[in-house]
Amino acid sequence: MISFKEAEQIVLRNLMDLGKELVPLENSVGRVLAEKIYADRDFPPFDRVTKDGIAIRFQSYENGNKLFKIQETAAAGSAQVTLSHPNDCIEVMTGAMLPKGTDTVIMYENLLLKDGNAIVEIAPQKSQDVHSKGSDEHSGSVLLDSGNLITPAEIGVLATVGKSEVKVKKLPKIAIVSTGDELVNIDEIPEPHQIRKSNSWSLKAALKSQGIIGELLHFRDSKEALLEGLGKAIDNYDVLLLSGGVSKGKFDYLPEVLEKLGVKKLFHRVLQRPGKPFWFGLNDFCTLFAFPGNPASTFANFHVYFLPWLRSSFGAQTDRCHAVLNERFENTTDLTRFILADAQLSQGTIKTNLVKDNGSGDLTSLARSNGLICFDSNRNYEVGELVPFYPTKKIL
Amino acid sequence: MISFKEAEQIVLRNLMDLGKELVPLENSVGRVLAEKIYADRDFPPFDRVTKDGIAIRFQSYENGNKLFKIQETAAAGSAQVTLSHPNDCIEVMTGAMLPKGTDTVIMYENLLLKDGNAIVEIAPQKSQDVHSKGSDEHSGSVLLDSGNLITPAEIGVLATVGKSEVKVKKLPKIAIVSTGDELVNIDEIPEPHQIRKSNSWSLKAALKSQGIIGELLHFRDSKEALLEGLGKAIDNYDVLLLSGGVSKGKFDYLPEVLEKLGVKKLFHRVLQRPGKPFWFGLNDFCTLFAFPGNPASTFANFHVYFLPWLRSSFGAQTDRCHAVLNERFENTTDLTRFILADAQLSQGTIKTNLVKDNGSGDLTSLARSNGLICFDSNRNYEVGELVPFYPTKKIL
C-alpha cells in the first residue's frame, strides 16, 4: 500500500492532454481559454467622453471665456463631429467620440444651460472626463492569456474584441460506472436487501458543476458483464469514474478485469480513510479512477484526486487551500484521514469544525458538511492549526 | 440621492416570490430545494456488513470457538441468508445483509481461510463492522430541509430516497436589455465611433453561472423604440437587467419611459462609484435593475445588488463576506467606493490587494480582479483592516 502523498503525486503526474476546440462565446463561460486574446483596436478606440455635458477647447476657457455657444449635440454612436469655432462648444453624451477641436469635457452638474449657451460655473481641469484613445490597452496587446478560466469578466473582454467563437480546452468525455448487484435505479422500490444508486447521481452532479455531462453506465458483478461493458467503455470515453468493485470481496472483480483489458494499474489501495481501496490506472487513451463503492469514499476520492487531476489537465493552478481548525483532532492511525468539515468564513478567515459521521455509508453527513480536512497519520492537531482543506460546497 | 446602505436595504426589501416547480433529479443541482426530504426507510435499511470477511455469532467465539466452517457466501444484493449452526459462519461481502443468527463481522485480514473453514487470528469485538439498521437515520426523519442549496452531496441523498423528481424554487425569467446606439453585435466590425456589446454577454454569462438562461434584447435610444420594446419585455419577464440609458444624457430616456409604462421607481442614483446612476423599480410582476451602461458600473451593481437580491429571493442566506486589506486606502469622497480586488487565500485567510483600473470603461481590469471591496465614504482604511468583500470569481 502506498501513502496518500505518493498516490496524489502519481495521479498528478498522469495528466491528460485534452486538446482544443472552438465553441460559441455564450458556451465558453466556465471553460479554460486555449488561445491568447489580443486587442483588435485601441481601448478605448477613440477619445471617449465619460460624462454628459459639453466639450470645449480648454485654451478658450484659459483665455477667459466662460460662456460657450452650443454648436450641436454629439451622441454616443454618432460619427465624430468637429467644433467649428474655438470659443463655442458641443454638447456631448457619455460614450460619444470627443469632437475634433475639443480636448476637455465639463459635466452638466458644473454648468448653467441658458438660451443655447453653456455657462461654466466650476473651473475645469484640462482633459478632464475624457478617456483617451488607447489608454486602457493598445491595439495588439495581450488582453487575456491562454490558460485563463473564462468567467463573466473574461466574457466581456472576449465580446469586446469580437470573439463570437472562442478556442477553449476540450472537456474529457466521461462515463460514470456503477457496479454492485445491490443497486437499483432511483425510480424503483428497493427490496429489503437492495439500495438505490446514489454515487452515480452525485458524481454526475459534481461533473455538471465542472461543465461536463457524464454518462451513467451500470454493470453487474460478473466477470463477463464487466469485461464486455468496460471493454467498450474504455474505447469510448476519455475517463471512467467507477464506484465499487475494488475491495477485497469475492465479487470485486474490477482489478482482475481491468488487467485483462490491458489497463495499466498505477496503484491499488492507499493508506487513507475513507477511500482506501482506490484503484488508479490508464491505457493510452483512457484514464480510470476506480473508487471504493461506499458514498463517503467515492465522494472523498473524487474531491482529493479527480478534481485536482482535472484542473491540472486543463493547465490550471491547483494551489491547495487551508483552513483553521476549531477543535482538536488526534489521528492515531497509520492512515491519512479525510474528515468532513463544517467550515465558515469568519472575519476573513476560514475556520472549520468537524462533522460527526456514522462511518463511510452515511450519506446525510456529506450533505451536512462543506469540505474535507486532510489529517496526516499519527499526529495530534490542536485548535488554531492550519489544515489542508478541500471545499465540497461553495463557501464564499 | 440615497446612500448605498439605503439602496441595498430597498433592494433586499423587495424580493420576489418565485414559486416552485418539479424538475428531474439530474437538473436539480445548483437549485434551491422547495420541499422537505424525509427518509423513506431506515438508513441503513438493514444491518449492513461493512467489511469483506465472515459473519459469526459472537457468543460462539466467546465460548472458545476459533474455527468456523463456512456455510455459504452472502453477497451484496442477495436476500438475507440464515446461519444454520451457531458455530459455523457465513462468508459476507461489504454491502450484504448481515445473516440471521450472526451479529459480528471479521474481515479477511484477521482470518486464515483453509479447507472451507475460517480460523480467527485476531480477536473480534462484539458487533464490529456492522452498520446497524437505522443508525444513520430513522424512517420518516428529515434528511434535507426546504431552502437547502442542492449540491452533489444533496443529490446523493435525493437519489437514495428515490426522488427522481425534485421540488425546487423556480428560476426567474430574465431578459438582459442593452441600450445605446454606439453598440454593435459581437460579429460585426465596429465603425470608429462604435463599440461591440459586452455588458449583455457578461451578464448572460453571470446568469448562466446561477443556472439562469438570460435572453438578450437590444433597443435603440429612442423613446418610441423603448416604450414599445420595454412594454413587451415587462409583460414577458420576471426580471429585466438593463444597462445604459439612466445617466443624465439627452438620450437617456429610460427613467421617463419606465414611468410612462407604469413601473414604480424605488430609487434613482446612489451615492456610490462606480454605478451611481443605478435605477431600481418594479410593477406587480416585474422587477427592473437598470444599471449605468459602462462595464465597471454594470459589473459592480450586478454583484452588489442583483446577486444578493436573487439569493434572498430564493430564501438563501446572504451573509456578507470579508477580506483583510493588504494595502491602505483613503476614500476622500462622499461616495461608497467599490474597488476591484485581487484577493488570495493565504494561510486560511482571504487577503486582498487593490487592482488599479483606468476608470469605469476599463474591461480588462475586471478580468484581472476576482472581487469587489466596499469602502465607506470619507474614511481611511489601514493595512490589516477587515473590509466587506464581494467575490466575482471563485477564490476557493
Image (cartoon, coloured by chain):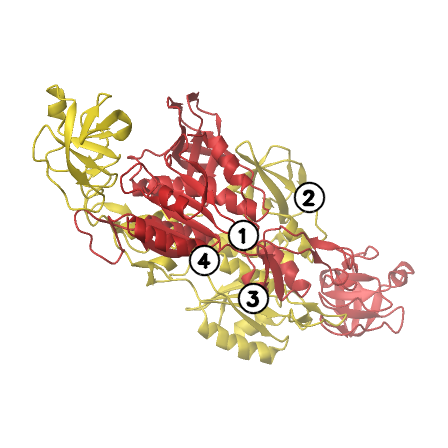
Chain colours: A red, B yellow
| Residue beneath the point at 54% across and 77% down | B229
In which chain is the residue bearing label 1? Answer: B
In which chain is the residue bearing label 2? Answer: B
Disc on the earlier residue, 3 or 1: 3
B197 over A8 or under it: above or below: below
Frontmost of labels 1 and 2 is 1
Where does label 1 land, which residue?
A: B304
- A98 displayed left or right of B166: right
Frontmost of labels 1 and 4 is 4
Q: CA distance from mark 2 to mark 4?
A: 62 Å
Frontmost of labels 2 and 4 is 4
The disc placed on residue A236 is 4
Q: Are marks 2 and 3 in contact (CB under 8 Å)?
A: no
Frontmost of labels 4 and 3 is 4
Estimate how packed mark 4 is, as few (under 14), some (14 to 19) or many (20 or more) residues with alpha carbons within 10 Å: some
Where does label 3 land, which residue?
A: B242
Q: Position of residue B46 (x, y in %)?
A: 18, 41
Q: CA distance from mark 2 to mark 3?
A: 30 Å
Where does label 2 land, which residue?
A: B332
Which secondary structure lies at badge 2? Answer: loop
Label 2 and label 4 in one chain = no
Query: Which quadrant would residue A83 be assigned to in this image?
Result: bottom right
| Residue beneath the point at 45% across and 73% down | B236
Q: CA distance from mark 4 to mark 3?
A: 45 Å
Question: Going by the picture, which residue comes out furthest to the front?
Answer: B115
